[in-house]
Amino acid sequence: MINGYRRIGALALAATLVAAACSSAGASPTPTPAPTATPTPAAMTDTPAASTASTSTASTPTPAATPQCVSGSITTSGSTALQPLIDAAGKQYVKECPGATITVNGGGSGTGLSQVAQGAVQIGESDVKAETKLPAADAAKLVDHVIAKQGWIMVTNKDVTGVTNLTTQKATDIWTGKITNWKDVGGPDMPIVLIFRPQSSGTRATFKSVVLHGATEATGGQTLTEDSNGAVTTAVTKTNGSTSVIGFAYYNDPSNKPLLNGLQLDGVDATLANMTAGTYKLSADGNLYTLGTPAPGSLTDAFLAYLMGPEVQGTIIPSLSYAPVVPVK
């Protein structure tokens, strides 16, 4: 379950995906990560294609109905909001193609983008566009593969009773430090504890853009910082008066949801249906970046094609509370 994710090192979450059973719309569980030790990333045998002619414009891999099995090793890193999806899809690919090894690391969107731009990993996972995190010259070397639509929800500790909805303005007042007690938004007389993500976080960047409209977040008062969606989820469940923002995949995990209060945003429920309809606005594309276009026949190319195919788009993505980007009949 997601609460098995642990804070490991400096912004690094990892699960080496070896041949194993597949992990976890709504309330389906997210995949169970591997044990606590951070694996040494696999050898970079799947070398990215030359990047001189590539740009940051979107690329759509050819969907694969069944995996094109390619042996070798690749590593992904970045967004922990996307990590449950990439973890589950990677495990299923390896189950069907045991000659492959796929290592999935966290670290945040900024980390994933920096590492793929440096050629340290084959795929960088990001909740935001590369140009928002990287110098223009580095972003221009990357190719964006949009593989899902994802949403986030504002959550509080269970002791914050009486608060079920926050308007954009009230949320902004809380996260900028103007409102510091839950009683001011209909809750108990209790200090608000803000649980932030690091500056590298795509979740933080998306929330700041979509809800706070770029407003400067609070720097004083009661605040904590956690380095992943999983760590934030755990911290909110254990910290009185706390609030934060987590991905749908983490909130809808049955081991997490009973321990959290999920809030409406501007009176709209945080659901896949509302996100897809455009009425729930705290959402963004799930981007996988490569350094140039992956070489045809490489494991990176095969895995990206698999992610766009019916097994992932039609089954794994909705089961983990993401929305597909490819219609599946």
Image (spheres, rainbow, N blue to C red):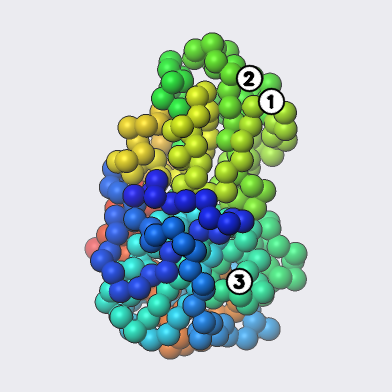
Disc number for residue 221: 1
The type of residue carrying mark 1 is: Gly
Of the two numbered discs 1 and 2 on the same chain, state the one appearing first in sequence: 2
Quote the CA–CA distance across marks 3 and 1.
36 Å
239 or 250: which is nearer to us?
239
Mark 1 and mark 2 residues within 8 Å of each other at the beta carbon = yes
Q: Which residue is mark 2?
A: 180
Mark 1 residue element: loop
Regarding mark 2 in the picture, which secondary structure is present there? loop
How far apart marks 1 and 2 lie (CA) works out to 8 Å
Does residue 194 appear to the left or right of 324 in the view shown? right
- Residue at 71 percent across and 62 percent down: it is 134
Residue 287, horizontal then vertical, whole percent:
52, 62
**Residue beneath the point at 33% across and 44% down:** 253
Name above or below for residue 212 compared with residue 145.
Answer: above
Tell me the kind of residue under disc 2: Thr
Q: Please say if 88 is above or below 174.
A: below
Q: Which residue is mark 3?
A: 116
| Label 3: element kind | helix
Where does residue 183 sit, x and y in percent of width and height? 54, 12
Q: Quadrant of the C terminus?
A: bottom left
Spatial CA span between label 2 and label 3 = 39 Å
N-terminal of the pair, mark 3 or mark 1, is 3
Residue at image point 69% right, 25% down? 221
Q: Residue 305: x and y, percent?
A: 39, 75
As drawn, is 42 to the left or to the right of 136? Answer: left
Q: Which mark is residue 132?
A: none
